[in-house]
Image (spheres, rainbow, N blue to C red):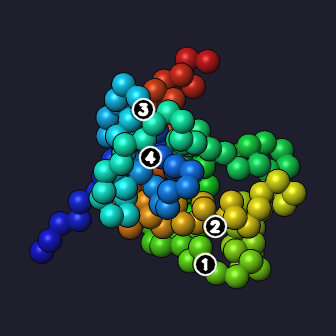
Amino acid sequence: MPTLKIKFMGLDKILAISGKPGLYELKAQTRTGFLAESLLDGKRLSVSIRHNVSVLSEIAIYTFTEEVPLREIFLKIQEKESGEQAISHKESKNKLEAYFSEVLPDYDEDRVYVSDMKKVIQWYNILQSKGITDFSEAEEDKATTEEE
């Protein structure tokens, strides 16, 4: 029986690069930027510091009361879908909004666009398909929280 390889990689090593599809894993830093590997096709890419890069651990979604970290939204999707894939990010606007309302009922409709919902759902599905399913806080985040 084959075993399932599960990757324990924090969202602090996963990148979204503006103008590039999918997600990337940070592999190494270079003098002019860093080296990243696509989670979609495994191709390596040299990224300069001029690119607009977002680290998934730093992204949050607006609600009416606070900003919810992306990892918490991924956990809610994971719970809703029992660890399986979410709906397709290519679903209709109405389906995406209804789905997002189930996952994050108090999201701010004025500041969270359908394009944001598509990205969140697509990113979750990419991570889930690659076995990157540990969305808990990073150890250093937990240590900082406990000290406060």
The amino acid sitting under disc 1 is Lys
Q: CA distance from mark 4 to mark 2?
A: 17 Å
Q: Earlier in the sequence, mark 4 or mark 1?
A: 4
Total numbered labels: 4
Question: Marks 1 and 3: which is nearer the front?
Answer: 3
With 1 as the anchor, is 96 left or right in this view? Answer: right
User: Residue 46, percent across and down?
Assistant: 37, 43
The amino acid sitting under disc 2 is Lys
Q: Earlier in the sequence, mark 1 or mark 3?
A: 3
Q: Earlier in the sequence, mark 2 or mark 1?
A: 1
In the picture of the structure, the residue carrying the numbered disc 2 is 118
The answer to which quarter of the image holds residue 35 is top left
- At a point 47% along the width and 60% down the height, the residue shown is 22
Which mark is on residue 14? 4
| In the image, residue 136 above or below residue 138 | below
Q: Earlier in the sequence, mark 4 or mark 3?
A: 4
- At a point 48% along the width and 67% down the height, the residue shown is 125
Which mark is on residue 68? none
Q: CA distance from mark 2 to mark 1?
A: 7 Å
| In the image, residue 143 above or below residue 132 | above
In the picture of the structure, the residue carrying the numbered disc 3 is 33
Q: Are marks 2 and 1 in contact (CB under 8 Å)?
A: yes
In the picture of the structure, the residue carrying the numbered disc 1 is 90
Q: Are marks 4 and 3 in contact (CB under 8 Å)?
A: no
